[in-house]
Amino acid sequence: MAGKPKSMSQIKQLLQLHHQGKGRKFIARSLGISKNTVKAYLEKLAMLKTDIQTLLALEDPVLETKFHPGNPAYKDDRFDHFKTQLDYFIKELPRVGVTKKLLWEEYKENYINAYGYTQFCFHLAQHQIARKPSMVLHHKPAEKLYIDFAGKKLSYIDKDTGEVIYCPVFVACLPYSDYGFAMAVRSQSIEDFIYALRCCLEFMGGVSLMLVPDNLKAAIVKTSSYEPDINRVLEDFANHYNTAVVPARVGRPQDKALVENQVKLIYNRVYARLRNNQFFDLTSLNQAIQGKMKNHNQTRMQRNPYCREEKFLADEQSLLQSLPLLPFEIKYYKEYTVSKNNYILLTIDDYYYSVPYQWIGKKVTVIYTRAMVYIYGNGNQIAVHPRRYRGNKYVTIDDHLCSSHKHYLERSPDYYIKKAEEKSQILHQLVQLLFKGGRPPEQNYRTCEGLFNLCRKTSPDIFNKACELAIECKSYSYKFVLKIIENISLSKVQDKSQEPLPVHSNIRGKDYYLQTTIKFKDNDAN
């Protein structure tokens, strides 16, 4: 009976013909098998010592065990010895540098009648499978949402610096319909993880009863097979969305086999199809991912007459819980003292945000989310800013600045020319000529400030005269105008000193001062 065993339906035909008294040659010709094969099966029949009618009543798999019981390797003494070593082999395999080949060599040295390497590996593998049998999980619609990050990253190019920015890819799927979602984020931080999860629920249009994350650092504080410590922010998120967090078991990828398979499919249907594309920001990268994921969800499944999206829309979407009115955002709380330049430094990002100047030197409470920065003083909101991650490190609202700071920021040639016109026409003309002189405008700002200061401190006649002379000499500097004012003022003082004294009678003459003894009148003596 060497070769491939015959089907049990054919063996039953053989038994029927034999029961009818037909010979071996007739049976062989009728069934298209060799006489030796017929002979072998009839010999087996004789060894079974069971009547033919009983055998014919058996189902095919049961009948097969009668004629083909197999030739198990467990009947000899080698297996009795080998199975006593199995627990030791399983314990040693995870150790560093230990391989099946090494364990087999050690086993062979200590036992003379040892298995060969192939049989050793076979029995060891059988034992490992028997110790950890897999289970088919039956999923209910809208019950769970599996969450994970893909092992590989996508990227975009920073158009300002040319730097390639690599982004982790958040992946989720509903196991009942296998409806998938993917999104690139800046990092695997709790902020980006929660943001991606929120976008996922909004994409699904509802919330499942349970969230099943892998043991991500963003989701799980401390891993455990029985009671993992869930990140407080994720718990707050789940409470906000009226769902529960049930992490997958540590080291049990079969718990989330569908999302693992989803990642493999995304490598082919998203990563591979975008490999030759260039993106210059995260938004355009995610738009491309969404397009490919739409095609993935609408692709007909191999073993089903429908696609993932059809299954989701038909059986699952209506059973999802409704989304809350307000989306969840992580809030962080900090206290800062407003610095002299009326900014607070958000240390986590190293960015400065302006606060009304009245709060300089006072303590304020800062509440910031992924997108916004809120500043409170004495229980009142005093400032709101969009959170900044790139660009200018100072985020400013002009109304927060005091007048001197505002003035400094508002400086421009037009500002100074307009201000000069308000003071006098000659100064307006001088400032216009100053900015036409060819120097960078910023170098003229302090000159204008000096001229405005002279205008305040000097009489209008003198100042206007000085400006006229500066224009005539084509020298518009602050020092030149100041020198003219000083010269005009000095010449006026000198003119005053040369004027004759007024006529009056109170003159004593030189004789009065030459006398040695002062003679007083009689009435003075009295």
Image (cartoon, helix red, strand yellow):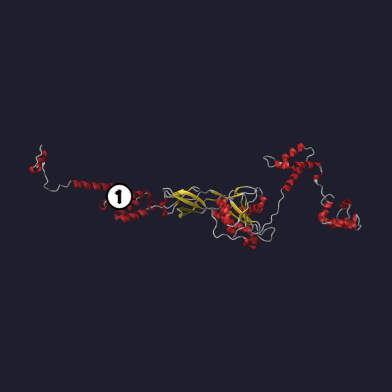
In the image, residue 75 above or below residue 375 = above
Q: Quadrant of the C terminus?
A: top left
Q: Dot 1, crowdedness within 10 Å: few (<14), some or many (≥20)? A: some
Residue 496 appears in the rendering? yes
- Image location (x, y in percent) of residue 87: 73, 42
Residue 31 appears in the rendering? no
Question: Which residue: 25% across, 46% down?
Answer: 487
Number of numbered discs overlaid on the protein picture: 1
Spot the residue most to the front. Answer: 526
Q: Is residue 266 left or right of residue 122?
A: left
Nearer to me, 139 or 418: 139
Image-quadrant location for residue 61? bottom right
Nearer to me, 144 or 275: 144
- Image location (x, y in percent) of residue 206: 60, 59
Q: Is residue 298 left or right of residue 13?
A: left
Spot the residue most to the left. Answer: 522
Secondary structure of residue under mark 1: helix
Disc 1 target residue: 454
Nearer to me, 472 or 71: 71
Q: Amino acid at mark 1?
A: Leu
- Image location (x, y in percent) of residue 84: 76, 41
- Image location (x, y in percent) of residue 294: 61, 58
Q: Is residue 495 left or right of residue 71?
A: left
